[in-house]
Image (spheres, rainbow, N blue to C red):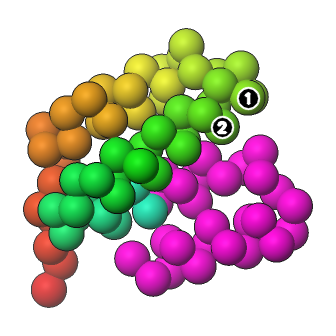
Amino acid sequence: MAEALHSVKVYQEEGLDVFLDIAYGNAALAYNAIEDVEEAMRYGRRVLRILDLKGNSDEKDGFRWREFVEKPKSHWSWSLKVN
């Protein structure tokens, strides 16, 4: 999870905010894996905002992330704890 959040900071520092959907997506998946629904949804919504800015919110990725935000516990990443 720390690596995912670190990548968000790197994107922001480099002025690459338009590409934050990747970093936010990684953070959302990491939080979902540890069953932190609120944070997973928070970062999932951020992905959707970036996709909207890019004009991609109605495409396949936008659909997937809307589904993730609506039902994070149904996503494959829920409770995906890797030992």
Is residue 47 visible from the viewing direction of this image? yes
Dot 1 surroundings within 10 Å: few (below 14), some, or many (20 or more)?
few
Residue range in magenta is: 1-26
Q: Distance of mark 1 from mark 2, alpha carbons?
A: 5 Å
Left or right of 28? Residue 33 is left
Mark 1: which amino acid?
A: Leu
Q: Where does the image place residue 4, in percent across and percent down from the top left?
A: 50, 72
Residue found 65% across the figure and 37% down from its top: 50
**Which corner quadrant holds the N terminus?**
bottom left
Q: Is residue 73 above or below residue 32?
A: above
x and y percent of residue 21 in the render? Answer: 60, 47
Tell me which amino acid carries mark 2.
Answer: Ile
Task: Name the magenta segment's main secondary structure.
Answer: helix
**In x, y percent, where is residue 22?**
58, 52
Asked if residue 73 is positioned above or below residue 1 in the image, the reply reads above
Q: Which is nearer the eye, 83 or 53?
A: 53
- Seen in the image, is 82 located left or right of residue 64? left
Q: Is residue 66 magenta-colored?
A: no
Q: Is residue 6 magenta?
A: yes
Residue 77 in sight:
no
Query: Are circles 1 and 2 on residues that touch, CB within 8 Å?
Result: yes
Q: Which mark is residue 7?
A: none
Residue beneath disc 2: 50
Residue 61 position (above or below residue 35): above
Q: Is residue 5 left or right of residue 32?
A: right
Question: Quadrant of the rendered structure where residue 18 is?
Answer: top right
- Dot 2 falls on a residue whose secondary structure is helix
Residue at (68% x, 73% y) in the render: 9
Residue of label 1:
53
